[in-house]
Image: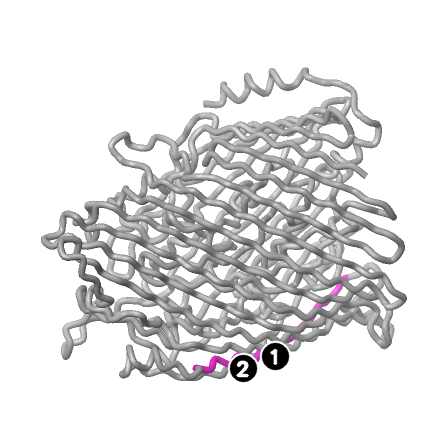
Amino acid sequence: MYKIAIVLLAVMLPLTTHAEPDAEDQREEYVRDFDTITVVAHRQPRSLSEVAGTVTVIGREHMERDMVVDIADLVRYEPGVEVDSGSTRFGFNGFRIRGIGGNRTAVIIDNVPAPDRFTVGSFSDTGRGLMELGLAERVEILRGPASTLYGSKALGGVVAVSLIDVDDLLPGDGSAHRMTTAGGTDSDRMRVTSTTALRAGNRSLILAAAGQRGGEVNVAKRPQDLPRDELDRRHGGVLLRGGLDTAVGRFRLSLDGLRETRDSDLHAILGHERFVDTTSLKGDDRRHQWRLILDHHFEGAGVASRGHWRAWHQQSDTRQETTEQRLLAPTPVELFRRFEFTQDMTGVGADLESEFSILGLDHRLGYGLELTRADITTQRDAMQTTLETGQSARFVLGEQFPLRDFPASRVTELGVYLHDEISLWHRGPRLSPGIRFEYYDLSVRNDPLFEARFPDAQTTSLSTTSWLPRLGLVWPINDSMELFAQYARGFRAPPFEDVNIGLEIPMFNIRAIANPDLEPERGRTAEAGLRWRGSDARAELAVIRNDYRDFIQTRAPIGFDPASGFLEFQSINRDSVRIEGVEARYQQQLGRNLTAELAAEWTRGRDRVDERPLPEVSPPRLISELAWLSPSTDWETRLIVSAVKSQRELRDEQGDALFSTPGHATVDLLTRYFPRQDLSVGVGLFNLTDRQYWRNAAVPGRAPDDPLLPLLAEPGRSLMVTLTWQSR
């Protein structure tokens, strides 16, 4: 299967023309970017060589090279990081880092947390409301528990997205513009973005918009007798950002928003299990989100050497409607369902840093706080219409609508942290102790609708506190090598939907009950590694072990209630899980124009009670890349081979088999051409061998005979074309 890729690479290599002299500096960043600046690891700028942990920085140049349109593209070649999905109807659910995903991984966009995901049943899934990546300039991924700096939702790690700012396009006064277009055959998708930056003296303005449209995934080797699940999806985002430079720093006022629509016509599951009588199933899903942020970045104010503060309000609204026709039922009916979810969040935060010396030791002391308040409400409605008589009722499958799955809730979170970096001697090791106090309060608001539908539900308010320590060490061996190690504690408070769930479907004798006694999830990570940078090479190795206690399993089956005959589900704490592994990366420049890179991960996760492998943990993976840059620097070609080992045999808590992803290898060929300094054209050929394969994050907990599995495979052979134009 490699012959096709080798032939195509050979064809691309000789194609060279002339480019502007300074274009070489822009396009050799990926080779010589040996000590990138990161912010996510300390909430202040640091070189990667100063960080006691593993951080990946994905800048604009990186995104253009990898032809990134959505978040799955963003981590396509990033071992240890995946995107949660698992449906042909709903979108992405967030990032999974080292096997931990969902709401356990913090996603922050311009230092503001993204909304939580909520799902119930087969017809409701909010996703995470991630910002359109066409407006992003930089993404940083911090791996492992990071609750000391980021609080309750950072049990698995942090993904920090920075939206475009005026300095990213315009170094001085004047105006600058950037336009990009991208189109791919993998899901017949297309995206267009446009950005304008203006600056006059101490005032600046950013105007940016991005929109994309696509359909269902064109999976490899779909069985001819399996119909497609049709999908028409549209996603758009806008950003308006004004800046004012003053003697005390830069103030910014930002307004951004996104709108997502997904119209689906589902066919694959018709005739199976609970859909045995269903002849039509259509979804109409809408999501709207907007944010208003005021922030201030400054240098040298009182005892603070640098810092920033922010205040924001964010609102996210989801509405999902499903129309189902059951023409094969003894009494033909049409079912209409509506799900609504609203999350309003207001918050303030500050991150400061002071530099000083005490007793001959240099300190960089970071300190800050974040206070957020979120009001969350949800409502489900439904109507059943008998097609023969036209009569309608709001009593469906034994449920009386409208209803709520949990009472209207308010979540208040306060975190205060202190984090120091101590240089033990000049050019010697740096010790970084830190601690955070985290307060979490879940309060149930007055909700007559929930009380009427679930009068026997045991709802409760919940308050919990935690101290979250961290200790890191970076020990420079010389100017190009350092050892690093860290120990950190993670924490996640019980979510509102697990504490106070109310769900009962009499038709199927199913009931979900609340668990007011849930304990917070807690994690401990130990990580050690080595980084090395040479004149034409670099390497990184990390060994990790994460232990999680009281892991919350949402709506786990707990048995039959003999009094009612219902099968009951309840969110419970699992005793202990462990995830351990190794991550490595090596890059070598093979002469002036040729570069080779290897990235690998080996991770194992298991439930320590019954030693059952965790299906959320990725199987071993190796990514190899050969990149060639023409002598005139106006052609760049990359050949990338990704090899993934088959997943271990998986079983659920009852011992039933789960689908285990088979091993596979894929070959991609990516080429960019720079006809002018302000213009680039990219062409990508993905999965050249048209291999059928699955990402394990896309098939969580599915049975081996699930009829939807073929449609959850990754795209077959596909083409993507990009065009980027930028002027100043």
Region in magenta: 429-444
Outermost residue, left side: 330
User: Where is the C terminus found, in terms of image quarters?
Assistant: top right
Which amino acid lies under the numbered mark 2 shown in the image of this protein? Thr
Disc 2 and disc 1 in contact, CB within 8 angstroms:
yes
Horizontal and vertical percent position of residue 380: 34, 66
Which amino acid lies under the numbered mark 1 shown in the image of this protein? Phe
| Secondary element at image label 1 | strand
Residue displayed at 59% across by 52% down? 542
Residue displayed at 25% across by 71% down? 400
| Secondary element at image label 2 | strand
Horizontal and vertical percent position of residue 528: 61, 57
Horizontal and vertical percent position of residue 4: 50, 19
Outermost residue, front side: 390
545 part of magenta stretch: no
Image height check: is 592 above or below 349? above
Say which residue label 2 marks.
465
Say which residue label 1 marks.
437
Horizontal and vertical percent position of residue 553: 37, 66
Residue displayed at 27% across by 83% down? 456
